Image (cartoon, rainbow, N blue to C red):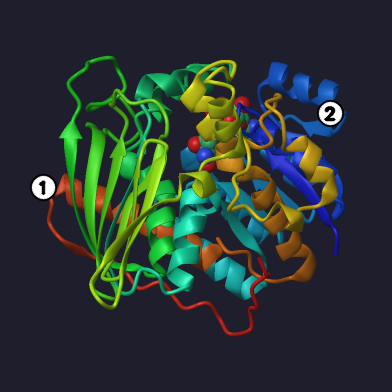
Amino acid sequence: MKVKIGIVGFGEFSESFLPLFIAHPDVEYVCGAEIYEPRRKHIEEVYGIKMYSSYDEMLEKDTEINSIGIFTQRHQHGPMAIKAMEAGKHVYSAVPMGITEKEVFDIIKLADEKDLIYMMSETCYYFPCAIFCRKMREEGKFGNITYAESQYYHNITEFIGSYNGSGNDAWKKDIGIPPMYYSTHSMSMAFSAMDDYPVEVTAFGYKDIENDGFYGKGMNHWDNEFSNETAILRMSKGAMVRINEFRRVSTIKPSSYITGVYGDRGTYEASGMQHLFMQRSDDDKVSVNDVSSIVDSYNYAQMIKDGGSMEKGILSYSYHRGFSPVHDIDRLPESFIELATGLHKPDTDGHGGSHPFLVDDFVRAVVQHKLPPVNAWTAATYTLPGIYAHESALKGGVTLKLPEIPKIPEKWEKIEI
Ligand SMILES: NC(=O)c1ccc[n+]([C@@H]2O[C@H](COP(=O)([O-])OP(=O)(O)OC[C@H]3O[C@@H](n4cnc5c(N)ncnc54)[C@H](O)[C@@H]3O)[C@@H](O)[C@H]2O)c1
């Protein structure tokens, strides 16, 4: 089976995936839907694909598509994915999977009962730091992992530019979403590095004091007052994880990253662009290795070589764009390599070089009818804890037990990556 995909939502994000879907050798057909006319016309003119004026219209009228790509506002993903799966379509969805427990469990149920591929477009799963830590864990270099911390820091004012382009003011109520509802970046990096899942959570929220209309009662769909939230999770094997989701923060890039994974044999620690891996030997000697050249992107290495002359925001660009030595670029379709190298627009190599791997994994999953790494079950593991963390924060930090996520049914094989 070849992929025939209808993509909904053409804000800033989806355009850096669209050329990859079009170029993939196993994608036969691409169409799109966008409510806002100027955005719809732009995509029609630049890419020449068929465009519909709403998601419902595309779902009802297009007889070609077997898959849906969801790139709409965060709180719309769950209901749109459910609608697509009820109509028998495979789903590729921007994060988060959903913002309610029901949405998350409904998606798992549909994937299971209807034999459909659901993949959450979790860019951070493919971030170099996450890949590096997974590799170290698989090689046994951490020993027993006891603790990890990761975070997503993104100041709220930087979202305005992408939120306010849909031709109306609805974004003003969307933007103040509880930070923990968007914690899949942080959770996926830590949990996949540890190969573990959480069983309980406690969290606190910082009540915002800025009065700029984003946070507070009546300011957003959720009456959310917290701009920053911090969660501590207990993992199934006993380790702890600390997650920070900050939307009132003075940092710029890196925004989502692992600060540390701590084992009784090995430790990964990062600060900015420096990444260290420390190992304790059997005779209790500790070696400290700078692994930055493996984890940082080729762009960053080039920027250092050029004496820091990379055009535009140095950290931002070198962190955000392009592959790293830990990426297995040889497994990607040839047509992706040119698209995903060079600092061009749209940034098909964006978010730490993750976009080409995401698209390729979804396409391979549909074609081979096997599960991608961030499938419905895994995505639930990365999404539900944030929903519960916000609940805990609203209750002043009470510890909440997390619901059990069903095991992946045995009938499913996973794609090789
Ligand atoms: N690293 C990451 O994983 C990452 C990065 C950026 C954005 N995102 C996520 O991707 C999603 C899209 O981001 P964005 O910045 O492009 O958002 P955006 O708000 O700029 O764009 C969403 C678009 O969807 C359109 N839309 C909404 N409902 C529709 C419908 N029913 N039919 C057709 N079109 C509809 C809107 O008109 C709008 O143009 C968001 O959920 C965002 O959080 C993820």
**Residue 47 marker:** 2
Q: Residues within 10 Å of mark 1 (few under 14, many from 20)?
A: few
Q: Which mark is residue 264?
A: none
Q: Is residue 254 above or below residue 190?
A: above
Quadrant of the rendering where the N terminus is positioned: bottom right
| Residue depicted at x 15% and y 60% | 399
Residue at position x 26%, y 33% in the image: 223
Could you tell me which secondary element the residue under label 1 belongs to?
A: loop
Find residue 312 and report its horizontal and vertical position in percent.
Answer: 55, 15
Mark 1 is on which residue type? Gly
Quadrant for residue 3, please give it: bottom right
Which is closer to the viewer, label 1 or label 2? 2
Residue shown at 17% from the left, 34% from the top: 206
Which label number is shown at residue 396?
1
Place of residue 289 in the rendered image (x, y in percent of width and height, measured from the top left): 39, 54
Where residue 382 sits in the image (x, y, percent)?
A: 42, 58
Question: Real-space Cα distance between discs 1 and 2?
Answer: 50 Å
Q: Residues within 10 Å of mark 2 (few under 14, many from 20)?
A: some
Q: Secondary structure at mark 2?
A: helix
Quadrant position of the C terminus in the picture: bottom right
Task: Name the quadrant containing residue 199.
Answer: bottom left
* Foreground of the two, 144 or 40: 144
